[in-house]
Amino acid sequence: MTSAHLTTLLPTVPLAGDKHSAPVTDWSGRIGWVVGLVIFIALVYWLMRQGWKWRGSLQSDVPELPALPEHQGAVKLTLSGRYHGSTSAGQWLDRIVAHGLGARSRVELTLTDDGLEVVRPGANDFFVPAARLREARLDKGIAGKVLAEGGLLVVTWEHGGRLLDSGFRSDRSAQHPAWVAAVNALPSAVRAAGGEAARSAAPRTPQTATTEGPAR
């Protein structure tokens, strides 16, 4: 019997040093999937920016925001928290993005005899003169942001012939009712004079608009 026959008859015994080969990873497929995901995210971001720019161009008639006064009036209230955006009054999804009003940020609010000072680190500060403040209320949604019922302080003010709602949330939400009371208790002569100017300049809105603020 030849060695060839013995090799055929004897079972094949694996050597102790033999190892199973590791599975081959399809790196090209994984890299392609990652690249596709990155491109998709970049496309979504680009579309969002284009939409933001388009909305800003539609609001080109919104004038520059009043700057903070050099001399601060007598302070009534202060608040630290977050600014959640501004919309057309009564239309909680009609976001205003002109002059940085669409950018969410931290905020320091100060209500004085002269008006409302809005200081936003990293974003545009602005000032609302007392004559342009219309009202304040508790709400739960603005500019697509939804919070708990009453978790949002919404201040309505007039700017450039239109009424705007701006939403704020204090770090201590228990402060909200005091702010609502203080804004709504502004001298009636000042508020009445400002209200007459707004009615003559601002377009009429449906009566139901003032109750449309809460998220649905």
Image (spheres, rainbow, N blue to C red):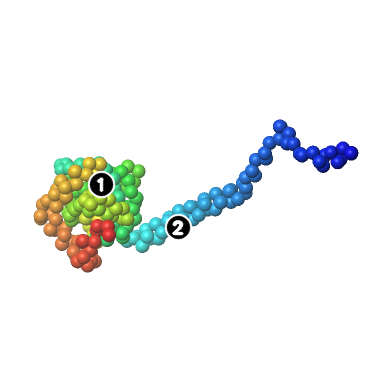
Residue at far top of view = 16
Characterize the local packing of mark 1: few (<14), some (14-19) or many (20 or more) Cα atoms within 10 angstroms: many
Circles 1 and 2: CB atoms closer than 8 Å: no
Q: Secondary structure at mark 2?
A: helix
Of marks 1 and 2, which one's residue comes earlier in the chain?
A: 2
Please give the residue where the numbered disc 2 appears in the rendered image.
47
Decide if residue 121 is in sight here.
yes
Determine the CA span between mark 1 and mark 2. Answer: 29 Å
| Residue depicted at 24% across the width and 61% down the height | 212
Answer left or right for 108 relative to 50: left
Q: Nearer the viewer, residue 134 or 67?
A: 134
Q: Secondary structure at mark 1?
A: strand
Decide if residue 64 is in sight here.
no
Q: Position of residue 7 (x, y in %)?
A: 82, 39
Can you say whether 10 is above or below 205 in the image?
Answer: above
Quadrant of the frame with the N terminus: top right
| Residue depicted at 12% across the width and 51% down the height | 185
Can you say whether 208 is above or below 134 in the image?
Answer: below
Please give the residue where the numbered disc 1 appears in the rendered image.
169
Characterize the local packing of mark 2: few (<14), some (14-19) or many (20 or more) Cα atoms within 10 angstroms: few
